[in-house]
Structures are given as structure tokens and as C-alpha cells.
Amino acid sequence: MLIGLGFEEHEFKSIVGENDLIHLLKINYYPPCPCPDLVLGVPPHTDMCYITLLVPNEVQGLQASRHGQWYDVKYIPNALIIHIGDQME
């Protein structure tokens, strides 16, 4: 991806933090709740990483913010959501 953005291959390590690079896998799973009004998900945030991969399901709730306005992310069956994180910006 960095090469596609115009960076040289040898620049990658210094861009991502060289030896301080941390790999992180975080999995959020929200089982069905009999009282949906009581459900708390993830609060508004930005993703610090380069990339976030989301495997959505039929339960709506994912939103994205653009210029201070929140938008619902449409569910598309069998789709994978790829979100570019803060480090890529």
C-alpha cells in the first residue's frame, strides 16, 4: 500500500516505527441481547492503526464520521469493510 502511495520499499520500516512496530489484533463480538436498549457498543473513536478489517453482519450500528457528520455504514451481504486508519492519514 505504501508503494502505491509513492513511498520506496526501503522506507517502510522507518514509516511504521522500525523496531518499535507493534502488531495488534482486536476482536469485538456482540452477541444478541434480549434488551437492545441496554446495549453499549464501542464509543466514538478513530482507529490508530494503518488498516482495520471488519466482517459485518446483519445487525446495523457501524457509523463513520465525515466533517463532523455521522453516517450509517450500509450492510452489504458477504462484504468486507476495509477502513484506513490514523497512521495512513
Image: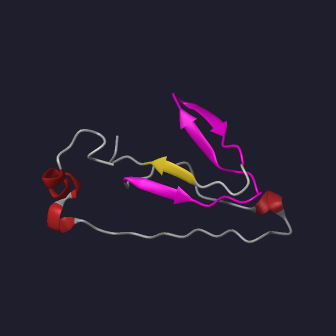
Residue at image point 16% right, 62% down: 18
38 to the left or right of 50: right
17 to the left or right of 41: left
Is the residue 32 above or below the residue 40 in the image?
Answer: below
71 to the left or right of 12: right
8 to the left or right of 84: left
Out of 3 and 11, give the one closest to the viewer.
3
Out of 81 and 9, give the one closest to the viewer.
9
Residue 77 in sight from this viewpoint: yes
Residue 5: percent from left, percent from top = 29, 39
The magenta-colored residue range is 50-75
Q: Say which quadrant the C terminus sits in.
A: top left
Is the residue 5 above or below the residue 46 in the image?
Answer: above
Residue 45 in sight from this viewpoint: no
Q: Quadrant of residue 6?
A: top left
Residue at image point 42% right, 54% down: 51
Is the residue 86 above or below the residue 31 in the image?
Answer: above
